Amino acid sequence: MRIPHWLLALALALPYSANVSAAPERFVLDPSHVSIGFLIGHARFAQVLGLFSDVSGEFVYDADTQTLNSGKVEIRGKSVFTGHEKRDEHVRGDDFLATDAHPMMTFQATDYTASSDRAGVLEGDLTIRGVTQPIALDVTLNRRADHPIGGADTLGGSARGVIERSAFDMSYALEGDLVSDAVELLIEFEATHEPR
C-alpha cells in the first residue's frame, strides 16, 4: 500500500516541530540561595562589601531559543548588611537608599541577548529611591540540573554589572570621592522551575 504524500510529509514534520517549539518555563528564585551583593569604594582606600538578605523574584525563560519572556526581582532595602550596624543605618537613611519612603528596590527585565549557550547580557530597569534607570548585567548560566538536595529542576547563574549611584539621586560624599559613585553589583542565584 502506498503512503499518501501528505501523510508522509506530516510524519516527517512532527518530530522537527516538537524539537523547536518547547514552551517557555517559569523559574522562581530560591530565597535561601540568592545573593545580591555590592562593592563601593571608600576614599579610594578600599572597597566596602555589602549585601541584601531579603530578595524575591521570578522569570520566564525559553532555554531552546535563549529568550527571556519576563523577569522581576524585588529587594527590601532595609535588609542591607555591611557588617557595621551604624553604617547600615546610614545606608538605609535618606543619604542613600531612603528606605522609609522607598522600602523596595526593583529590577524589571526587558531583554536578554545570548552570546553563547551559557552567557549573555541581561538588560532591564532598576528602580531605587523611586528613580528608574536602565542597566545591563553580564550573565553566566552555570548549570541546570536536578538539585542534589530535594531533586527540584534548578537553574543557577551569576551576574555582574556596575551602576552609578548619582543616577539614582544619591550624591552624598561624592566630592573628593569619599564614597565612590560607581557601585559594582555581584549577583548569584539558584532558581527552581515551577509550573506556570
Image: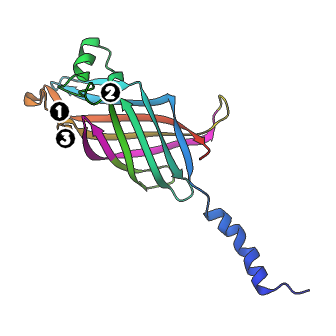
Query: Which stretch did the figure color magenta?
Result: 125-147
* Mark 3 or 2: the one toward you: 2
Image position of 66 with respect to 178: above or below? below
Residue 64 in which image quadrant: bottom right
Residue 37 in the figure: left or right of residue 34: left
Q: Residues within 10 Å of mark 2 (few under 14, many from 20)?
A: many
Among all residues in the image, which is located at the extreme right? 1
Secondary element at image label 2:
helix
Q: Amino acid at mark 3?
A: Ala
Instruction: Please tell me which of labels 1 and 2 falls first in the chain.
Output: 2
Q: Give whichever of 112, 91 is nearer the camera.
A: 91
Report x, y in % for residue 94. Answer: 19, 25
Secondary element at image label 1:
loop
Residue 119 in the figure: left or right of residue 175: right
Image position of 86 with respect to 191: above or below? above
Report x, y in % for residue 11. Answer: 76, 74
Q: Residues within 10 Å of mark 1 (few under 14, many from 20)?
A: some
Asked if labels 1 and 3 touch by Cβ distance under 8 angstroms, the answer is no
- Using the image, tell me which numbered label, if any, was put on residue 170: 1
Q: Amino acid at mark 1?
A: Met
What's the magenta bit mostly, secondary-structure-wise? strand
Q: Give whichever of 167, 35 is nearer the camera.
A: 167
Report x, y in % for residue 84. Answer: 29, 13
Instruction: Check residue 130 for magenta coloring.
Output: yes
Instruction: Check residue 28 for magenta coloring.
Output: no
The residue identified by callout 3 is 167
Q: Residues within 10 Å of mark 3 (few under 14, many from 20)?
A: few
- Residue at image position (50%, 56%) is 66
- Using the image, tell me which numbered label, if any, was put on residue 77: 2
Report x, y in % for residue 106. Answer: 35, 38
